[in-house]
Amino acid sequence: MSKRVALSIKSMDGLDSLLDPRFGRAYAFLILDLETREVFAQFFNSAASAALGAGTAAAVAMQSNDVDAVISGRFGPKAVQALMANDIEMWTAPVDITAREAVERFATGSLEQMAVKVY
């Protein structure tokens, strides 16, 4: 089974979208199959304007789309907890690149996996 990867994006321009630096309050998400590079879904982040719980709600959206890994600029503490609870990997990328560039960097191993300390 191929790996399903989600990216936080700033526009609805598919792989040409710039990466959004925020996970929970990202404008939208792009989900693709890493092996085929086929876009599975692209959708607005309904949690972006939530008063509270944006990171948790965004993590739920990742889980409901069977995402294995998320690429974003940063992740808040509640998002980290929710993603960890669902065994979803978190990877950080520079935010001045496109989703396509982030996917290429991910595929070649040049992104950094977010280190999370468990106490």
Image: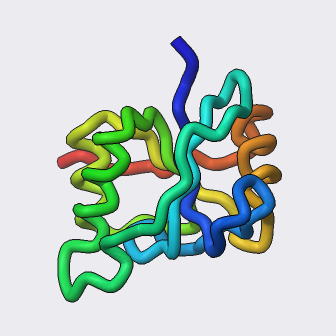
Q: Position of residue 113 (x, y in %)?
A: 55, 45
**In the image, residue 50 above or below residue 82:** below
Q: How is the image coloured?
A: rainbow
Residue at image point 53% right, 32% down: 4
Q: Position of residue 66 (x, y in %)?
A: 37, 33
* Residue 69 appears in the picture as rendered: yes
Q: Position of residue 10 (x, y in %)?
A: 63, 74
Q: Residue 4 versus residue 44: which sits nearer the camera?
A: 44
Residue at image point 23% right, 54% down: 81
Residue at image point 25% right, 62% down: 57
Q: Is residue 34 left or right of residue 57?
A: right
**In the image, residue 82 above or below residue 52:** above
> So how many labels did they put on this image?
0
* Residue 91 appears in the picture as rendered: no
- Residue at the extreme top: 1
**In the image, residue 109 above or below residue 43:** above
**In the image, residue 30 above or below residue 28:** above
Residue at image point 21% right, 41% down: 85
Q: Is residue 29 left or right of residue 49?
A: right
